[in-house]
Amino acid sequence: MRVKVDEDLPRATVQMLRDKGYEAVSVTEQGMGGWKDPALWQAVQSEQRFLVTADKGFADIRFYPPESHAGVLLLRPDEDGIRPIIELLERVLANYDLEALARTVTVVTPRGIRIRRAGT
């Protein structure tokens, strides 16, 4: 599965995804750092990549409805820092193959994982 990691996430997230066998690239690696959300979204769509981000705007299903894209995984820790993000991603990767989350908007918090599919 092809994955793009947003610039708001630590570099370690890209390596974690690669270690699990995903074809992961970061926005920063691709020289897209600082891009506005609409331009970044167009790039994600043209590359048909699943987006992993901490930007809650990408989880707005009015603008990014499930089934209209490869998928969005939003990591929403309660506290700042690298460790809380890593812990949320570890939780997802321990319980899901990202293929199962394709074409969804999935929000992960310390309290749980909410998967939004078309019509839900």
Image: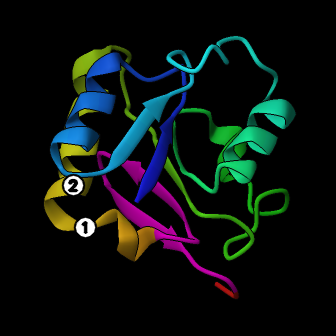
| Residue 3 locus on image (x, y percent) | 46, 47
Above or below 38: residue 9: above
Q: Is residue 14 left or right of residue 90?
A: right
* Residue that lies at the very extreme toward the bottom in this rendered image: 119
Pointer 2 local density, CA inside 10 Å: few below 14, some 14–19, many at least 20: some
- Classify residue 24 as left or right of residue 41: left
The answer to whether the residue labelled 1 contacts the one labelled 2, judged by CB atoms less than 8 Å apart, is yes
Magenta residues (range): 102-118
Where in the figure is residue 88, as x and y percent of width and height? 27, 42
Dot 1 corresponds to which residue? 96
Image quarter of residue 40? top right
Q: Position of residue 31 (x, y in %)?
A: 63, 13
Front residue of 114/20: it is 20
Residue 91: say if magenta.
Answer: no
Residue at x-position 31% and y-position 51%: 22
Give the residue number, with chain letter if any, for mark 2.
93
**Residue at the spot 37% in from the left edge and 46% down from the top edge:** 23
Q: Depth check: give the residue in front, 24 or 108.
A: 24
**Residue 29 position in % (x across, y down):** 50, 17
Question: What coloring was used for the rendering?
Answer: rainbow
Q: Does the stretch in magenta take in 103?
A: yes
Type of amino acid at the residue the image marks with label 1: Tyr
The answer to which of 103 and 62 lies nearer the viewer is: 103
